[in-house]
Image (cartoon, rainbow, N blue to C red):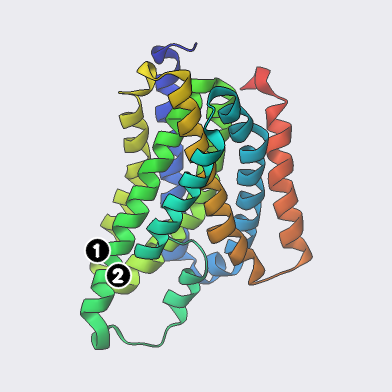
């Protein structure tokens, strides 16, 4: 079993990189909005292939090995994020374009937009918090799974940053920068929180947490990332999706370098 001192630094390092990835998405949306919107589907395609490969090559097999209720836990993880997105908008897909293209004026529905902006902020922050915990749990298993989980989180944090700024800026432009930074910080905060409990977890609990993580990743890929790629279906999207899966497969074979 890996000691806490051995995993604390990589957990905090990679979760901080994930936070920076969110800020990168925010920066792209602020400075290069047209380019970010035009190329976001490539990022989403790559991230979808990467995340699904991680789930089916690593998280699910490891969870099944550690826990007898892994498959129900995977479904629960999927269902929890389904419920969350039915009450709080946290997609990284079509809402981006909706926020930019909508002709409705803010003055005509200011209170509604403000409520939606606040809901989006809390939903995205909670999502990022969970991402940080997933990184921590991954490193509790071993360095390879922790690294791969971190890569998956980092890849979908870029489109999440784009989404964060698009949603919040539409509703509360004066608070968009601050709220976006808080969403980014939530990932390393979640990783820091994980350090206080992962060391005392049994294999069964770790397996359940991995299964929950697998379910949430499947939902993120199926509900957030893949639908966005369908908006501009082309050969390049297919290639980037496959490259994402290949990336995980190749990195998995380089354990000695991780």
Of 189 and 77, which appears nearest the observer? 77
Count neighbours of disc 2 (C-alpha within 10 A) and say few if under 14, some if 14 to 19, many if 20 or more: some
Residue under the point 46% across and 62% down? 91
Residue 82 location (% of width, % of height): 45, 57
Residue 18 as seen in the image, left or right of residue 185: right
Q: Mark 1 = which residue?
A: 175
As drawn, 136 above or below 257: below
Residue under the point 50% across and 27% down? 207
Nearest to N terminus: mark 1 or mark 2: 2
Residue 90 location (% of width, % of height): 41, 60
Q: Distance between the residues labelled 1 and 2?
A: 13 Å
Q: Residue 103 carries which label?
A: none
In this orientation, does residue 3 appear?
yes
Residue 28 location (% of width, % of height): 47, 60
Secondary structure state at the residue bearing disc 1: helix
Count neighbours of disc 1 (C-alpha within 10 A) and say few if under 14, some if 14 to 19, many if 20 or more: few
Residue under the point 68% across and 35% down? 57
Total labels: the figure holds 2
As drawn, 183 above or below 68: below
Q: Mark 2 = which residue?
A: 116
As drawn, 74 above or below 42: above
Of 124 and 161, which appears nearest the observer? 124
Screen quadrant of the C terminus:
top right
> Can you tell which quarter of the image residue 148 is in?
top right
């Amino acid at each position: 079993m890996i000691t806490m001192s051995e995993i604390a630094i990589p957990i905090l390092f990679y979760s901080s990189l994930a936070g920076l990835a969110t800020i990168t998405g925010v920066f792209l949306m602020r400075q290069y909005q047209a380019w970010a919107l035009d190329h976001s589907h490539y990022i989403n395609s790559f991230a979808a292939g990467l995340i699904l490969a991680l789930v089916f090559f690593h998280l699910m097999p490891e969870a099944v090995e550690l826990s007898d209720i892994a498959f129900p836990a995977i479904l629960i993880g999927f269902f929890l994020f389904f419920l969350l997105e039915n009450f709080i908008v946290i997609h990284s897909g079509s809402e981006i374009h909706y926020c930019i293209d909508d002709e409705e004026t803010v003055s005509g529905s200011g209170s509604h937009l403000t409520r939606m902006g606040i809901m989006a902020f809390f939903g995205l922050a909670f999502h990022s918090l969970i991402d940080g915990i997933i990184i921590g749990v991954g490193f509790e298993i071993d360095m390879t799974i922790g690294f791969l989980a971190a890569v998956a989180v980092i890849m979908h944090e870029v489109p999440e940053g784009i989404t964060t700024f698009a949603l919040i800026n539409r509703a509360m432009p004066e608070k968009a920068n601050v709220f976006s930074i808080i969403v980014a910080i939530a990932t390393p905060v979640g990783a820091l929180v994980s350090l206080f409990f992962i060391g005392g977890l049994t294999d069964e609990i770790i397996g359940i947490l991995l299964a929950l993580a697998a379910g949430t990743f499947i939902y993120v890929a199926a509900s957030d990332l893949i639908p966005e790629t369908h908006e501009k279906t082309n050969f390049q999207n297919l290639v980037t999706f496959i490259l994402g899966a290949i990336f995980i497969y190749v990195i998995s074979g380089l354990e000695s370098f991780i």
